[in-house]
Image: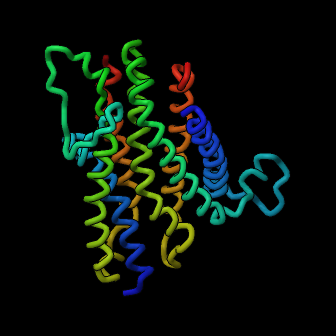
C-alpha cells in the first residue's frame, strides 16, 4: 500500500507541475522573449498540456480511489480516535472536490483541444483554474494527512 | 448534428450536472451503493449502522459512501449528458457558457458548507 501511495504522490506532483504551468500561462501569458524564471515558467504552449493533465488527473484519481479503501480502514479510525476532526473535514472536502473535478475533465479537454471559434476563452480559463485549485487543495491536504498518520506509521 | 457537437454538448452537460447532482447526493445521502472495505462487501443503496448498543462497531466495520455518491451523481449526469447530446445545436448554443464553470464552483462551495459540521466537533 505504501508503494501505491508513493506512486499516487508522484503522479500528483507531475499533475501539479503541469496544471500550474498551464494556469499561469492562461492568465498571464509571457511576452515574446521571457527573461526571468517566472517568465519562462508561464511561457509554455498551454494547449499541449491538456492531454497530459487529463491523463494524470484520471490516473491520480484512480490511484487515490484505491488507496482510499485502505485509508478508511487503517488510517481514518486512528485519526477519529485522536480527535483530528478538522483534518478529516478537510479530507472530506478533498474527496468532494476530486469527484467534481473528474467530471469536468471532458469539458476541460474540449475547451483546450476542440475550441469553437465563436467561444469566449473565459470558460476555458475558469475550468482550468477550478481544476488547478482542486489539484493544489488535494495535494496539500493529502500531504497533511500523510504527515499526521501515514501508512505503516 | 455532428458528432463533435454531440460530444461537446454531452461533456458540458455531464460536468455541470454531475456537480449539481453530487451536492444533492451528498445532502440527501443518496449513495448508489455502500462499501465495507474491511469486509470486502458492497451493498446496493445507502446503509447506516443500526448498532446503537455498541457504536464502536463503526470503527471495526467502517462504511464508505463516497464511491456511492459519486456513482449516483455520475449516473444522473450521464442521463442529462445523453439528452443534451440529442438536442439540436441551435438550442445548446443559447445556453450561457458561464454555467459550465459557475455550477461546479457553486457546488464546491456547497460541499464545503455541508462539511462544516466536522469543524464544530
Q: Position of residue A100 (x, y in %)?
A: 40, 50
Q: Residue at x 39, y 27 (%)?
A: A73
Q: Is residue A134 rendered to the left or right of residue A83?
A: right
Which coloring applies here?
rainbow
- Judge whether B2 appears above or below B31 on screen: below
Q: Quadrant of the N terminus of chain A?
A: top right
Rendering quarter of residue B109: top left
Q: Residue at x 27, y 42 (%)?
A: B42
Q: Is residue B39 rendered to the left or right of residue A114?
A: left
Rendering quarter of residue B12: bottom left
Q: Position of residue A45 (x, y in %)?
A: 70, 64
Q: Quadrant of the C terminus of chain A?
A: top right
Q: Residue at x 40, y 36 (%)?
A: A93
Q: How many marks?
A: 0
Q: Is residue B57 rendered to the left or right of residue A115?
A: left
Q: Is residue A104 rendered to the left or right of residue B37?
A: right
Rendering quarter of residue B59: top left
- Judge whether A85 appears above or below A114 on screen: above
- Judge whether B86 appears above or below A54 on screen: below
Outermost residue to the top: A82
Q: Residue at x 66, y 65 (%)?
A: A48
Q: Position of residue B35 (x, y in %)?
A: 30, 39
Q: Position of residue A42 (x, y in %)?
A: 71, 53
Amino acid at each position: 500500500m505504501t508503494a501505491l501511495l508513493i506512486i499516487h504522490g508522484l503522479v500528483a506532483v507531475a499533475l501539479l507541475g503541469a496544471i500550474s504551468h498551464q494556469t499561469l500561462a492562461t492568465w498571464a501569458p509571457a511576452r515574446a522573449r521571457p527573461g526571468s524564471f517566472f517568465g519562462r515558467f508561464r511561457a509554455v504552449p498551454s494547449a499541449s498540456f491538456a492531454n497530459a493533465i487529463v491523463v494524470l488527473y484520471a490516473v491520480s484519481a484512480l490511484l487515490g480511489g484505491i488507496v482510499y479503501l485502505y485509508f478508511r480502514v487503517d488510517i481514518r479510525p486512528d485519526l477519529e480516535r485522536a480527535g483530528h476532526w478538522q483534518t478529516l473535514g478537510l479530507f472530506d472536502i478533498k474527496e468532494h472536490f476530486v469527484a467534481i473535478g473528474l467530471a469536468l475533465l471532458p469539458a476541460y479537454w474540449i475547451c483546450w483541444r476542440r475550441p469553437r471559434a465563436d467561444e469566449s476563452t473565459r470558460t476555458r480559463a475558469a475550468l482550468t483554474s477550478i481544476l488547478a485549485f482542486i489539484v493544489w487543495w488535494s495535494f496539500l491536504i493529502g500531504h497533511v494527512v500523510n504527515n499526521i498518520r501515514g501508512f505503516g506509521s | 448534428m455532428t458528432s463533435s457537437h454531440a460530444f461537446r454538448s454531452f461533456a458540458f452537460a455531464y460536468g455541470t450536472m454531475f456537480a449539481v447532482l453530487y451536492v444533492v447526493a451528498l445532502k440527501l445521502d443518496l449513495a448508489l451503493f455502500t462499501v465495507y472495505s474491511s469486509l470486502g462487501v458492497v451493498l446496493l443503496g445507502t446503509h447506516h449502522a443500526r448498532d446503537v448498543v455498541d457504536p464502536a462497531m463503526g470503527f471495526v466495520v467502517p462504511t464508505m459512501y463516497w464511491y456511492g455518491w459519486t456513482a449516483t451523481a455520475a449516473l444522473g449526469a450521464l442521463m442529462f449528458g445523453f439528452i443534451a447530446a440529442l438536442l439540436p445545436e441551435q438550442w445548446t448554443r443559447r445556453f450561457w457558457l458561464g454555467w459550465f464553470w459557475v455550477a461546479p464552483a457553486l457546488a464546491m462551495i456547497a460541499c464545503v458548507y455541508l462539511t462544516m459540521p466536522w469543524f464544530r466537533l
